[in-house]
Amino acid sequence: MIMTGAEPFYFPGSEEIGVLLVHGYSGSPAEVRELGERLNKDKAYTILGVLLPGHGTDPHALEHIKWEDWYLAVQAGVKKLKKTCQKVVVIGMSMGSLLTLVAASELSVNAIVVMSTPIYLYDWRIHFLWLAQRLNWALPKGGKRVVDADERYNVSYDCLPLWGVRETWKLISYCKKHVLQKVKVPTLIIQSKNEHTVRPLSAVFIYKKIASKIKKIFYLDDSRHVVTLYQGRGKVLDAIEAFIKEQV
């Protein structure tokens, strides 16, 4: 059963531009829903927010899910939007940004936006994942996060299942080795300077490695990791709207 508020969503709009929204690891479509609502209301874009396999139900559902399963959901989302929209933009949050980069390297999309993309992480425990998995099946998050957005957008698991952390780590490695150099579409990279999950150096690494001729980094000074839920999210929306208008 899907958690209340974690449901996928679809907002019909213009047949010109469709936007696929991809949430992060252990999160849900709720964390990008406000962004989707605003893009649909302000610009009349058709919006699809996908629920990645293993998410939005029970943390144990992530056991034995592979990152390729998450990517299949993104592929299906792009395919669905292409049935009704002339152009497709993919926007990802955190781990969802990695999937967005894979999509840009393989699928016919017109532009992408990647937010808080995990290339370099602050958490040193990731290097001892092999040991952590022997001791426990999940890591606690340290209490429910307090956000600036409405609570209906704050729907996620209260822990980090280690199987999925391992798959995310594999996805990071895959993107660094096989994906970034194949990304050629216009790309907006959004990164908070003050978060404690992803090192801001990640944004620079992506900018340098992708083959896109049109690429921009938009930094936030007043946000945390999930930039759509904290102070400064209005700036995120403005930057995304301007980027799509200019490049798509």
Image: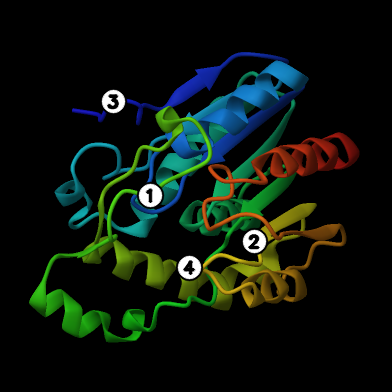
Contact between marks 4 and 1 (CB within 8 A): the answer is no
Q: Residue at x 73, y 15 (%)?
A: 14
The numbered dot on residue 145 is 1
Q: Kindly identify the amino acid type of the residue bearing the numbered disc 2.
A: Ser
Q: Secondary structure at mark 1?
A: loop
- Residue 88 rendering spot, x and y as whole percentages: 69, 34
Q: Residue at x 48, y 68 (%)?
A: 197
- Residue 221 rendering spot, x and y as whole percentages: 70, 60
Contact between marks 2 and 3 (CB within 8 A): the answer is no
Q: Give the labeled residue for mark 4.
A: 197
Between circles 1 and 2, the one closer to the viewer is 1
Instruction: State which quarter of the image contains the N terminus.
Output: top left
Q: Could one spot residue 15 in this view of the protein?
A: no
Q: Give the labeled residue for mark 3.
A: 4
Between circles 4 and 1, the one closer to the viewer is 1
Q: Kindly identify the amino acid type of the residue bearing the numbered disc 1.
A: Arg
- Earlier sequence position, callout 4 versus callout 1: 1
- Residue 226 rendering spot, x and y as whole percentages: 52, 51
Q: Is residue 77 left or right of residue 110?
A: left
Marks counted in the figure total 4
The alpha-carbon separation of the residues under discs 2 and 3 comes to 28 Å
Could you say which quadrant of the image residue 54 lies in?
top left
Dot 2: within a 10 Å radius of its alpha carbon, few (fewer than 14), some, or many (20 or more) residues? many
Q: Nearer the viewer, residue 141 or 5?
A: 141
Q: Give the labeled residue for mark 2.
A: 192
Q: Is residue 53 left or right of residue 72?
A: left
The numbered dot on residue 121 is none
The alpha-carbon separation of the residues under discs 4 and 2 comes to 10 Å
Between circles 1 and 3, the one closer to the viewer is 1
